[in-house]
Amino acid sequence: MKRRLPYLFILTMSLAIAAAPVLAIRVGQPARDFTGTASNGQTYKLSDFRGKFVVLEWHNQGCPYTMKHYQSGSMERLQKEWTAKGIVWLTVISSAPGEQGYVNASQENDYLKRMNAAPTAALLDPHGQIGHLYDAKTTPQMIVINPNGTMIYDGAIDNRPSTSVSDIAGAKNYLAQALTEATAGQPVSTPATRPYGCSVKYR
C-alpha cells in the first residue's frame, strides 16, 4: 500500500492540473494565441498579426447595447477609421447555438453587408474558446493588443452604459482613446474599464 501512495499522489495532482481552468489574461500580459474561422470562410490566427495593433470586439446582433452602436453607425465608423490606419479589427461572436446572438456564416455575412460594417473579419466562436480565453463578459466588450502582442486595453467601448443612441455623442470613447494614445507611442491612460452590455451567451 505504501508503494502505491506516491503513485496515487502524482496521479491525483496530474488530474487536478489537467482539470484546472486556463486563467484569462489581463492588461499588461501577453495575449494568448488563438485560431478562428471567420464568416468569410478564412482562418485567422492572432499570431499572424504580430507587429500590428489588433482590436477584438465581442458582438451579439440581438443585444440592445450592441444595436445602439451599430444602428447609429458609430461602430462602423470606428472600424473604417482604424482599419484604414492599418489596425486589424476582429469581431468575435461567442454566442452558442440556440442562444441569442448565434449566427452561421451566411447570416453574419448578410448582417455585415446590411449594416455596412467593416471589420477585418468576423470570427465565429460558437464553442466560446476565444471568449473564455479572454474572459469576455459582455457584448460589446473591447480588447486592444499592441504590436508586441501585449494586451493594452480591456473593457467597455465608452463611459455611457446605456442603450440610448443619444448617449453616444457625449460619451468618452475608451477604445478610440486607447488606440489614439497607443498608436502615437503613448501609454494608454485608461487601460481597463468595467465592460457593459448583454452577457456573452456561452453554452
Image (tube, grey):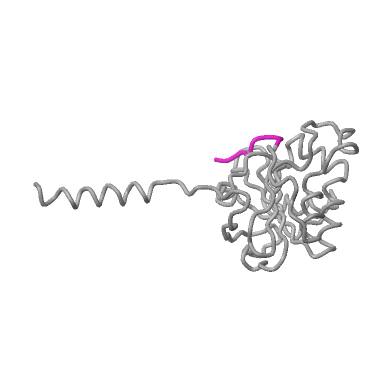
Q: In this view, does 170 lie above or below 124?
A: above
Q: In which quarter of the image is residue 35?
A: bottom right
Tell me the quarter of the image containing the C terminus: top right
The verdict on residue 198 being magenta is yes
Q: Nearer the viewer, residue 66 or 159?
A: 159
Q: Position of residue 3 (x, y in %)?
A: 11, 52
Q: Is the magenta stretch mostly helix, strand or loop?
A: loop
Residue drawn where x is 84% and y is 48% of the image: 115
Report the side of 33 relative to 188 (left or right): left
* Residue farthest along the left direction in this orientation: 1
Q: Position of residue 67 (x, y in %)?
A: 79, 39
Start-end of magenta stretch: 196-203
Q: Where is residue 43 in the image (x, y as percent from the top left)?
A: 63, 64
Report the side of 48 relative to 1 (left or right): right
Q: Quadrant of residue 98?
A: top right
The count of marks equals 0
Residue drawn where x is 74% and y is 57% of the image: 89
Residue drawn where x is 79% and y is 31% of the image: 162
Q: Which of 174 and 162 is in front in this view?
A: 174
Q: Which of 172 and 88 is in front in this view?
A: 172
Q: Is residue 51 above or below residue 174?
A: below
Report the side of 165 relative to 98 (left or right): right
Q: Position of residue 163 (x, y in %)?
A: 80, 32
The verdict on residue 74 being magenta is no
